[in-house]
Amino acid sequence: MIIDTHAHLGDVLFGKNITFKQNVTTRDHHNLLSLLEENDNVPFPGFLEMDPDTVSESILNEEQARNNTATLQNMQSSLDRNGIDKIWVLPILPTVGFEELLAASKLDERIVPFTGIDFALGEAAVDKMLRDAENGAGGLKVHPILQCRPMDDPLLLGALDAWKQTGKPVIFHTYAYEYYHPEEAYRNRPDYASNTKFVELAKQFPELTMIAAHAGGPFDFGEILEGKEVKNLYVDTSFQSEEVIRMFLREFGPERVLFGSDWPWGCQETPLRLVSKAADKDQRVLDLLFFENASRLMKGEN
Ligand SMILES: [Zn+2]
């Protein structure tokens, strides 16, 4: 049994209607992101000597290309290929919302749709979100960068407070990342995703299961590791190396680490392989990361 706790459907960057399109193919071309993934998410020889702007441009181009392939059909192929039984699919409002993911879940029962906070609704966003929880949302996703909301936003804090009654997990994007080329940078706020502020937020809401997506990112994961005593703080493995996954297993314990890929932004093969390596063939650890932790959270226990 394998549960992937982090994936997307639909064009979360521009809102093009792609989820149910057929035969959208992935371009097969050389790019630095795929090379990094093949090299277990660690810099390969020569990587660190490359011009940082060239590196970011290559990775951003590839991420945008992958975003355009986030169709149900492509997700299904990846699930089949990798033997994945369930997948948490996360909306990012205003581009992709709960209804679209709920529809996908009716077509494939492996999909667990999450909901988000629709800030455009103002105060009514809270009722909408709670209604989604009753209608089958497995949890709540918040993306401070793409939703352009800081973590001390009053509506966000009110929504988190109300979400307690559902007993379901909350996933936040962590670490600053620029999702757009400079001419479109107005669409996002990388500065709103502070790892240290997220740890503080998790402390502020001890009743909520608070999951740091990407475990703080490839460079600043140490800021999330600092939160090891915050018992309601969890991480997923997307984009992390074997070494960093081992650090979280040691510091957080295997009960608070979740297998997650961020498909299609990350391919599923890489974290599958790296979680297996980091677990050192310990079946108990493998079971916890691949499905037991996620199943427990789905039942509203933490
Ligand atoms: Zn994601």
Image: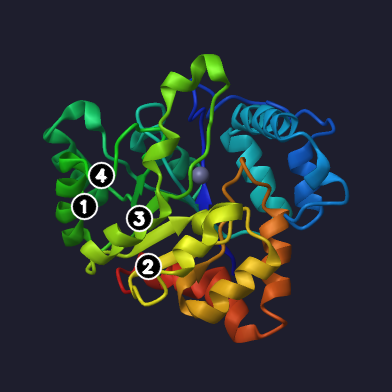
Q: Residue at x 33, y 54 (%)?
A: 197
Q: Which mark is residue 233?
A: 2
* Residue 5 showing in the rendered view: no
**In what element is the residue under mark 2?**
strand
Q: Are marks 2 and 4 in contact (CB under 8 Å)?
A: no
Q: Whole-percent x and y of residue 229?
A: 37, 77
Q: Whole-percent x and y of residue 292?
A: 49, 75
Q: Which mark is residue 186?
A: none
Q: Earlier in the sequence, mark 3 or mark 4?
A: 4
Q: Identify the amino acid type marked 1.
A: Leu
Disc 4: which residue:
132
Q: Is residue 5 left or right of residue 285?
A: left
Q: Nearer the viewer, mark 3 or mark 4?
A: 3
Furthest-right residue in view? 45
Q: Residue at x 43, y 28 (%)?
A: 188
Q: How many marks?
A: 4
Q: For the residues marked 4 and 1, what is the alpha-carbon distance in whole angstroms?
A: 14 Å
Disc 3: which residue:
198
Between residue 224 and residue 164, name the one nearer to us: 224
Q: Nearer the viewer, mark 1 or mark 3?
A: 3
